[in-house]
Amino acid sequence: MEIKTVQSFIDYYEKIRERTNRIIEVVPPEHIDFSYKPGKFTIGDQIRHIAAIERYMYGETISGRKSAYPGCGKDIADGYGDTVKFFNEMHRQTLEIITGLSDEDLTRKCLTPANHEISVWKWLRAMIEHEIHHRAELYIYLNLLDVKTPQIYGFSAEEVQDMSVKL
């Protein structure tokens, strides 16, 4: 997928974010600190990580600045409510940065934290892929807790199979 206009990217990204928000909405607040194994991200870490990377890595680098990723620990936001507030605020700030881009800016180069040049549109595409990756991890965490999760496109795999023609 090539991103040619800022507005088309924002429209698409907001649909991705809606799906992420739906999974975050079903996180039981008492499980915000759940991790499947000591030393691995908790549910809260996953949510804070998506937010902090979006704003402080992607947002900064597309603005021509160096990544300022602060990590994703409880020092950023503690508890379910504050974590969700942080998540939403970082998204708001990042959208403000993206909205300030021109369509021509999408083709200019920015520097990744590893000092690799990449087109802004490709870096924005990577931001979406990053969010989807961590959203999938949230699904796994919640499944381990037996929390009913929303279907991403409205149907389960079994329902699609039932609706499909038999070969």
Image (tube, rainbow, N blue to C red):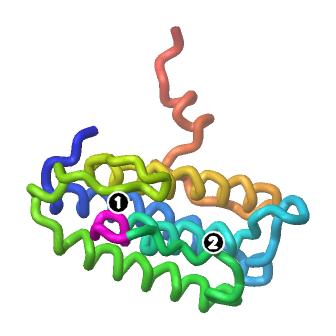
Residue placed furthest toward the front:
115
Q: Amino acid at mark 2?
A: Val
The image position of residue 93, as x and y in percent, is 35, 81
Q: SS of the residue at dot 1?
A: helix
Point 52% across, 8% down: residue? 167
Point 61% across, 52% down: residue? 136
The image position of residue 84, as x and y in percent, is 56, 83
The region drawn magenta spans: 60-65
The image position of residue 30, as x and y in percent, is 79, 83
Point 36% across, 65% down: residue? 61
Can you tell which mark lies on residue 26? 2
Q: SS of the residue at dot 2?
A: loop
Q: Earlier in the sequence, mark 1 or mark 2?
A: 1
Relative to the observer, which residue lies in front, 17 or 77? 77
Residue 62 drawn in magenta = yes
Can you tell which mark lies on residue 35? none
Q: Amino acid at mark 1?
A: Lys
Alpha carbon separation for disc pair 1 and 2: 18 Å
Res. 91 image quadrant: bottom left
> In the rendered image, which residue does mark 1 sit on?
15
Asked if the residue under mark 2 is in contact with the one under mark 1, i.e. CB atoms within 8 Å, the reply is no
Residue 158 drawn in magenta = no
Point 58% across, 77% down: residue? 70
Position of the N terminus, as image quadrant, is top left
Residue placed furthest toward the right:
38
Image position of 95 (left or right of 18)? left
